[in-house]
Image (tube, rainbow, N blue to C red):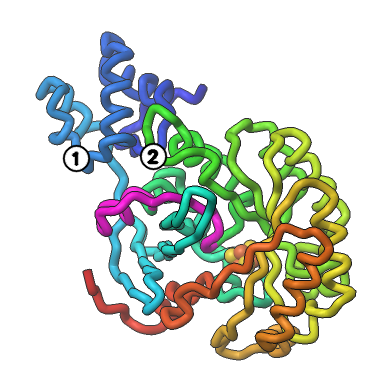
């Protein structure tokens, strides 16, 4: 393990053992139980200053303040949608901004009504992939988020709203698999039962499809769900919509998704945005059903909503929502072929809920503080 002894290390996001190693820089006499206390204070009780760690001796608290810091992010804008969706714009320590979306939903199951509060996390500032339906793509990649910045989105939203998040999806700005190490670090904390943050089964990591990383992820043993942003059933269309497909065509991705199921026993999810006349035909439904039947899986069907790109060019200009009756027919065709389909609503349409749009807007317009 790396020796962490340099000045002012941020302690949030470290594993317990790493934190113990870091404390050895203060004194080799510091006991392991102190590292445990600090680690729990940071990640379970979410203190924001060393002074709040009242069980520690005063001189230790002072030493912690001299050598280390607790990272933070600042909510600079919050918008509420009529359907209850909340969108947060967070400013990072270097002034860059990311967005996090909280989506409430109500579902019925055998036990009755289930209320969910799903938090959609960002993993990068901007994104290097150039998906043609996504506003984040126009921001380009600024940098990866640290593990602490990923965790803080959960901690801050729960602190601001006073409510616990019931589900987490890594589906905001950025491609999680391109920030692999920090995503893994954040998952280690979020899914740790001792910290009682959220159960692993309630976390989904969504990827645009990097087969090597998917296979590696399958070996991590977190027990979280994996979703693939598929959106097309032919390489020709998928490459147009998601240029990363040229490098990693569909067949290799599906084999990697099969591997994830075989390794973890957790059914995989395919995300599919429906675009008028591009991927909503009977032939598309047949191909999608064939993909879904390879392994136990679920398909999330998502209605497209128009994004206000400044200058849509190429295929971006051709993207339109499918009419409601055709959309429903597409869903029916899938169900008729035995596919487990969930229709996702376009939550927060009135607050620019497409990924990247709030951060994109704030690049051009000063954002008022509304907290
Ligand atoms: S959809 Fe996801 S992977 Fe694609 S450009 Fe947007 S943020 Fe990046």
Q: Is residue 258 left or right of residue 49?
A: right
Q: Position of residue 9 (x, y in %)?
A: 34, 36
Looking at the image, can residue 320 be seen?
no
Q: Which residues are magenta?
A: 154-173
Residue picked out by circle 1: 49
Is the C-beta of the residue carrying label 2 under 8 Å from the nearest atom of ligand 1?
no
**Residue 232 picture quarter:** bottom right
**Residue 198 picture quarter:** top left
Q: Is residue 90 left or right of residue 355?
A: left
Quadrant containing the C terminus is bottom left
Helix, strand or loop under label 2: loop
The foreground one among 2 and 302 is: 302
Frontmost of labels 1 and 2 is 2
Residue under the point 59% across and 52% down: 176
Q: Is residue 170 magenta?
A: yes
Q: Is residue 99 left or right of residue 308?
A: left
Residue picked out by circle 2: 197
């Amino acid at each position: 393990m790396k020796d962490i002894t340099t000045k002012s290390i941020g302690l949030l996001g470290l594993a317990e053992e790493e934190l113990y190693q870091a404390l050895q820089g203060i004194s080799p006499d510091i006991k392991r139980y102190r590292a445990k206390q600090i680690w729990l204070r940071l990640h379970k009780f979410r203190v924001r200053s060393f002074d709040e760690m009242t069980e520690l001796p005063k001189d230790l608290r002072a030493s912690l303040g001299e050598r280390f810091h607790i990272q933070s992010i600042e909510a600079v804008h919050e918008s509420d949608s009529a359907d209850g969706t909340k969108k947060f714009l967070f400013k990072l320590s270097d002034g860059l901004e990311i967005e996090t979306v909280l989506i409430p939903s109500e579902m019925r199951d055998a036990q009755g009504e289930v209320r969910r509060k799903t938090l959609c996390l960002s993993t990068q500032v901007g994104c290097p992939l150039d998906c043609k339906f996504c506003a984040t793509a126009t921001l380009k990649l600024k940098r990866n988020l640290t593990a602490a910045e990923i965790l803080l989105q959960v901690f801050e939203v729960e602190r601001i709203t006073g409510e616990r998040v019931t589900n987490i999806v890594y589906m905001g700005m950025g491609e999680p698999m391109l920030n692999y190490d920090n995503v893994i670090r954040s998952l280690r904390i979020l899914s740790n039962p001792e910290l009682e943050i959220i159960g692993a089964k309630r976390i989904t990591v969504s990827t645009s499809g990097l087969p090597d990383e998917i296979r590696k992820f399958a070996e991590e043993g977190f027990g979280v769900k994996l979703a693939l942003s598929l959106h097309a059933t032919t390489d020709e269309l998928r490459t147009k919509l998601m240029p990363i497909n040229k490098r990693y065509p569909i067949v290799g991705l599906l084999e990697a998704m099969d591997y994830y199921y075989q390794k973890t026993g957790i059914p995989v999810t395919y995300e599919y945005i429906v675009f008028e006349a591009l991927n909503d035909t009977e032939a598309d439904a047949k191909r999608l059903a064939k993909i879904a039947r390879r392994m136990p899986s679920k398909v999330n069907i998502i209605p497209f909503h128009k994004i206000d790109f400044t200058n849509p060019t190429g295929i971006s200009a051709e993207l339109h929502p499918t009419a409601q009756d055709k959309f429903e027919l597409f869903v029916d065709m899938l169900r008729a072929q035995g596919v487990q389909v969930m229709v996702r609503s376009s939550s927060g349409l009135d607050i620019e809920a497409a990924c990247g749009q709030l951060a994109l807007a704030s690049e051009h317009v000063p954002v008022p503080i509304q907290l």
